[in-house]
Image: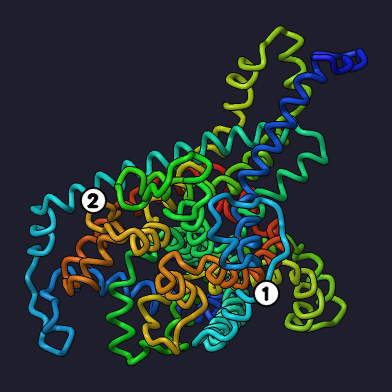
Amino acid sequence: MTAALPPITPRPRRRGRNVWVNLLGLFVFAIAAFPVYWMVLTSFRRGVDVQKATPQFLPSPGTLNNYRKVFKRDFFWTAVKNSLTVTLIVLVAALFVAFLAAVAVSRFRFRGRRAFVIAILIVQMVPAEALIIALFRILDGWDLINSIIGLSLTYLAFVLPFTIWTLRGFVANVPKELEEAAMTDGSSRMRAFMTITLPLVAPGLVATGVFAFIQAWNEFIFALVVMNKPDKQTLPVWLQAFNEGAKGTDWGGVMAGSTLMAIPVVIFFLLVQRRVVGGLTAGAVKG
Amino acid sequence: MEHADGITPRRRRVRPLPYVLLVPATAILGLMLGYPILRLVTLSLQKFGLKQQFGAAADWVGLKNFRSIFADAEFWMVLRRTVVFCAVNVVLTMVLGLAIAVLLKRLGSKMRLLVTLGLMLAWSMPALASTVIWQWIFDTQYGIANWALGRQGESWLSNPLTFYFVATIIVVWMGIPFIAFTLYAGLTQIPDEMMEAASIDGARPWQRFRDIVIPSLKPLLLILTSLSVLWDFRVFTQVYVLQRAGGITRDTNLLGVYAYRTSFGGNHFDKGAAIAIVMVTITVLLTVFYLRSMTKQEEL
């Protein structure tokens, strides 16, 4: 080795350790981010390049053909439309219903309050996967198979516990005194609530709304069972059908589909994750 | 309610408003969660196969469905597999998550931002998209994993053991970010003075980790482990998609997928429901444990 020795620093040992820590950091970053990078990269690759014996890790002159193919594929736009419709219904309904419940639980003391909160916590843990069978039979009985309404209702029930739980924390964090001050100034309770509390809770509504959006947008299993006609598929079910149909021959197309499905989620998620994370461990929440 | 202590009549009156506010939430949860749970119980106590799907009356059969699944060796196999899969995934997620949390604490602010960004990307990916990506990485013909390991045409999904290896990578990859971030937040709560005092007293890094960090994080570790157990016990999407890609289902079923296949594939909604009941029961027991560790943390 003829390379020049590094200049001696006042704390060489610490320096040396930092290099290892940083290398480890890079390694973790690479493992975490690589699959996402690989997805995007593959989605812009030509078929011949995807099937090369030696993979190329850096972006190369690519193509938009995979995306064109996805856009032209049967039922893609129907799936986008279905996903958007279900997601919007769930988002609006969940926010409205959860907000009312959150206000009730965090602003009032009443008989059954504690029981309700505990029920919410328990219900949140019921594995949806176990309920598919029964929900399918029920929705079938109500003629709500392959129905946007049926799927939305199902999703609504599954996001409500968490949205109520999270919003409850946000509402509780707005001091009641603020509202009361407005009320002594002559505002009605409703008015005080609308002008004081609601704006302060707005960030919480955004965060929980995005959570509901992501859940409904990503959900796969229920959509798979409940929406079994091609023109009723949501985006994840459409993507899986594409994936199964391609049988490992059209990775460029499948990755383009995955990228399109993931983009809105990744963006929304990065925007709000800070606000929602606390809800799960509830460290920040006080009733 | 007793009012012997002379509470004024105004306070005694039940205010209807909070109950009114709870009506929509209760209605939806009751209809779409409560009722299905009830229906699951009734299904599991009936005979419900192909005929009943087309309108034949469902007879009550008592615990016959449970007896029949408990007598089935495959059920026990799947249950054992599910428990082992869950345990392996939880341990890996927690250990690696804690290690990354400690790493985040050690890193400078720029590197920390970079690692955080990477973890966020992994965390935000939809489960289905993640599974499809990893399926591509482990593709038999053109997958990058085979290239990197120098194995040509290795078919990862057609052998149960390598199948679970891939499934575990996906589940752990998706699960780590939340654990790492939460534990990192917990680590930043440990006062620096405490660590400094310990190192002045001559505690080695490992001793500080064992005697200060772990005890301080214990409540958090408990909650996160319980949550991970609950989540990894119900893994479905990853296994389902990999099964569709790999072709073997019988040897790779986990409880959730098994219940699904028994119902929709085998048209035995009754037995499927019984399996699902077992799954719910185990989950509820685990949840009680989770809630107990959580309610110790805060007042409801």
Q: Is residue B206 above or below residue A186?
A: above
Callout 2, which amino acid?
Answer: Val
CB of mark 1 within 8 Å of CB of mark 2?
Answer: no
Q: Is residue A271 visible?
A: yes
Q: Secondary structure at mark 2?
A: helix
Q: Residue at x 26, y 74 (%)?
A: B39
Which residue bears the numbered disc 2?
B78
Quadrant, the C terminus of chain A:
bottom right
Given residues B87 and A287, the one toward you in this image is: B87
Residue type marked 1 = Leu
Q: Look at mark 1 in the image and give the residue it sits on.
A: A64
The location of residue B264, given as percent across then percent down, is 24, 73
Q: Nearer the viewer, residue A243 or B291?
A: A243
Cα gap from disc 1 to disc 2, whole angstroms: 44 Å
Judging depth in this view, the residue of B35 and A139 nearest the camera is A139
A127 or A188: nearer the viewer? A127
- Residue B280 percent location from the top left of the image: 31, 58
